[in-house]
Amino acid sequence: MKAQYAILRFAKYKGPEIGHIEAHNERTKEKYASNPDVDTTRSHLNFHLVMPERKYRAEAEKQIAAAGCRTRSDSVRVVEALVTASPEFFKGKKKSEVKAYFTEALDFIQKHQSKDTIISAVVHMDEKTPHMHLCFVPLTEDKRLSAKEIVGNKKKLTWWQDEFWKHMVRKYPHLERGESASETGRTHIPPRLFKEAVHLNRMKDQIMAILNDSNPFNKKSKAEELEALLDKYIPGVEIMRTKLKKYDKTYKELTAENAALEQKLNSASRESIQKKLEIQRKLCELDELRRTVDAIPDEVIRAYTARKYVHHSGIKQEI
């Protein structure tokens, strides 16, 4: 049976991005174009374990002011804990069983972080794998604002992983301990990058379909549709390229480690074989993301370049 892991991740937020995570967590957007995994026909299945009393940022500022903390523009005001498990863990489970898992996880977090600081805990059932977004204000027991002290170093993150697994395994004995990015020594590749890649590939397919389907009778309407897509697709690719630069070092390290394991293959232990498979999986993931931004068809580049030339030169004509 495939290993099933208890998963706990943390992210820290400082300012305007708090509103973005709130819109995602609380499902206040009308559309989720950048996240194709969200199936809005199933959003009614989502549920709260802690219901927010007000906007995330407003609640954070309220708690910070009440604690008498001074803040800077770069102060972390909200920490988000993402709680889930391997997809296999949830297979065949009823909603009540899923809720019991996340309730147990909430109990764990409340043992180590005051429940009064928790802004929201919402479970998403409308994506591929059930997961909980739990947001809290990083106030310490003595009322200091310190995300660094709560979750901000390798030692503390390892502690969280250890304690989370110890807590959850008592009720779910088949769960194995997850690994944090700090323990593996590599930057975790966030799932949202793969979702963005899927979205970009869909836009590319739409653009190619328009370019192949244009004719004198539909040229004007197709040009308007093409313009709207190009204005999203090309900048989206550039943003993705910038994000992927962060993983260049990771890619080189994984490649070197993979080569070293190849040399030891004859005397490979079960652990080293598993490690090699994990490395190859991560390399494939990075290669997949790279292909998304590298494989822009020439026709798309020409269409975008031509449109930009027309706009910058002030020429008004159909493309």
Image: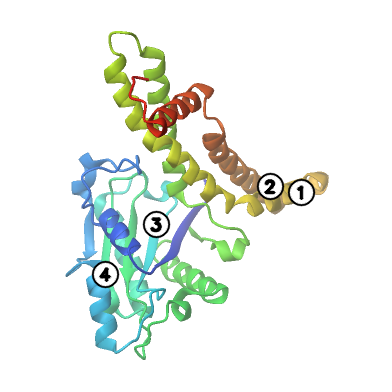
Q: Which tag, 1 or 3, sits closer to the chain's start?
A: 3
The residue lying at 75 percent from left, 50 percent from top is 256
Query: Callout 1 environment at 10 Å: few (<14), some (14 to 19), or many (20+)?
Result: some
The amino acid on which the numbered mark 4 sits, given as a three-letter code, is: Arg
Quarter of the image holding residue 102? bottom left
What element does badge 3 sit on? strand
Task: Judge left or right: residue 248 versus residue 24.
Answer: right
Q: Which tag, 4 or 3, sits closer to the chain's start?
A: 4
Task: Judge left or right: residue 166 versus residue 136.
Answer: right
Residue identified by numbered label 1: 261
Using the image, tell me which numbered label, if any, was put on residue 308: none
**Image x and y of residue 212, in percent:** 41, 14
Using the image, tell me which numbered label, if any, was put on residue 57: 4
Distance CA(mark 1)–CA(mark 3): 31 Å
Distance CA(mark 2)–CA(mark 1): 7 Å
Distance CA(mark 1)–CA(mark 4): 47 Å
The residue lying at 71 percent from left, 51 percent from top is 272
The amino acid on which the numbered mark 3 sits, given as a three-letter code, is: Thr
Residue identified by numbered label 2: 276
Q: Which tag, 1 or 4, sits closer to the chain's start?
A: 4
Distance CA(mark 4)–CA(mark 3): 24 Å
Using the image, tell me which numbered label, if any, was put on residue 84: 3
**Image x and y of residue 282, in percent:** 59, 46
What element does badge 4 sit on? helix
The residue lying at 62 percent from left, 48 percent from top is 278
User: Do the residues bearing badges 1 and 3 touch, measured as CB atoms within 8 Å?
Assistant: no
What element does badge 2 sit on? helix
